[in-house]
Image: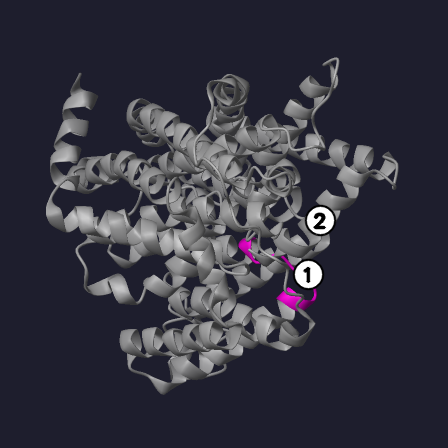
Amino acid sequence: MDVLALLGEGFAGALTWQNLIWVLLGCVLGTAVGVMPGLGSSMAVALLLPVTFSLDPTAAFIMFSGVYFGGLFGDSITGILLNTPGQASAIASTFEGHKMALNGRAAQALATAAIGAFIGGIVASVLLVFFAPLLADLSSSFGPAEFFALAIFAFAATSSVVTDNAVKGLASLFLGLGIAVIGVDGVSGAPRFTLDSPNLFDGISLVTVTVGILALGEVIYVASLERHISNKTMIRPTGRPWLSRKELREATPAWLRGTAIGLPFGVIPAGGSEIPTFLAYGIEKRLDARRTKPRFGTGAIRGLAAPEAAGNSTTGMAMGSLLALGLPISATAAIMLAAFRQYGLQPGPLLFERAPDLVWALIASFFLAMVVLLILNLPFAMLWAKLLLIPRPYLYASIAVFCGLGIYATSGATFDLLMLLGIGLLGFLLRTNDYPLAPLIIGMVLGPLAETSLRDAAMSANGDLTTLVQSPIALAIYAVLAVVLVFAIRNRVVARRAPADSPDRESVDAGGQRDATSR
């Protein structure tokens, strides 16, 4: 009952007209960015970081959460209408969603995606209300060894499990760790990797890195490929934008199964919602194969419903692990963790004690965001799709200008603009060579935590590093990591032995190489 009372106070804070505006603005921005291929919620949050420093923390994070959820809604629109998923998490939805659109059922496909995302998000938000405080209480028993184990879990999972090439994933991770250690060491006071430049004594700002890697690097990449990008024909939805009773009966079990599959991945740093969406699609396909007349491959509604519910349920629970454990499971969550630190806040049990108004207003805003996004997407999906008509040169030139203005506004230093350009070029090189960007961001965000935890653990044990594996919680985290890695290796071995001419295998590989490495 105490939790429900706190949630009620959160709704009282979130339902003020100012915060309602931020919820609406975040949902609109997230959907708009998600609709345009190549962009994503991580880029939108990175671009908004410099702008929101003058906002109240509650308003800023309410808007960020709207962007986070809205990006998933927007990705589905382009995946269904153009067969061009904006992010890797939307690839599984295109397999049956685009076939539904080709069969003249685009409006029903968009409705299926919107309702599935709503169900997954609402169920995750309800569970978050009750389990986030429990996770926060659990994390209060964490010490340096446990936090170091948690960081290692995040590093290993995001760099090797969800990437096509573990070597490239680890290289991206170590690059992020290398950037994180630049500056004056907080313990010894010695400058590290500063090249004797006073401009680097304070390190490289995470805001500069995220904007450069995710936004400016993407702009340069798209500009270099502009002449080679084919313009696909967009399918225009016609007919009823709602589902019949028969379609609802068909889709409901898939929505529920997808939600159940996505929930556990919200607390596992395995790259976000990419894995659960593919798992949900695969399970539905196996169930369909048992039917007398299999429907997959012709526009099966279950093949769209399950991945959409799985993606949003994962994102909803991810916010819980971010608030209660300070553990980001994706690049977008990592940027939000950095935003908390910019405001002087540290997610975890102390956040629930020191800033309960912010935490519960933010959790209440998740419910509001789900309702707003459902209203925005059911009747207005085609309106969002018209954003694809914006000429790419105008769109990306505006993003480049916004990158520079945001960075200069936060520091007022020309050096930061030059650093932004250099990091943008680095992001471009990583994109062109298919290096994943999420491990770099997570490495830079969690690198200081891992370093500090390692030092504290070693100092408290007089240099005995075995203290890192003496805690039952730390051992449990390492055991779960070992299981995750074993399953990842097994799946890759099975995938290599699969027939090379499998159409689903080819489409997944092509989509994964194109999109999974971009975020």
Which residue has dot 1 on it? 434
Q: Nearer the viewer, residue 285 or 441?
A: 285
Separation of marks 2 and 1 at Cα, in angstroms: 9 Å
Dot 1 crowding, Cα within 10 Å, few <14, some 14–19, many 20+: many
Does the magenta-highlighted stretch encompass residue 8? Answer: no
Q: Nearer the viewer, residue 269 or 480?
A: 269
Where residue 372 sits, quadrant-wise, is top left
Residue 143 pos. (x, y %): 39, 36
Q: Nearer the viewer, residue 78 or 408?
A: 78
Magenta region's main secondary structure?
loop
Which residue has dot 2 on it? 164
Apparent side of residue 92 relative to residue 420 in the rendered image (left or right):
right
Apparent side of residue 82 relative to residue 500 in the rendered image (left or right):
left
Q: Nearer the viewer, residue 224 or 317?
A: 224
Circles 2 and 1: CB atoms closer than 8 Å: yes
- Which colour style is shown? one colour
Apparent side of residue 423 relative to residue 202 in the rendered image (left or right):
right
Instruction: Give the magenta range.
Output: 431-438
Label 2 amino acid? Asp
Looking at the rendered structure, the secondary structure element under dot 2 is loop
| Tag of residue 400 | none
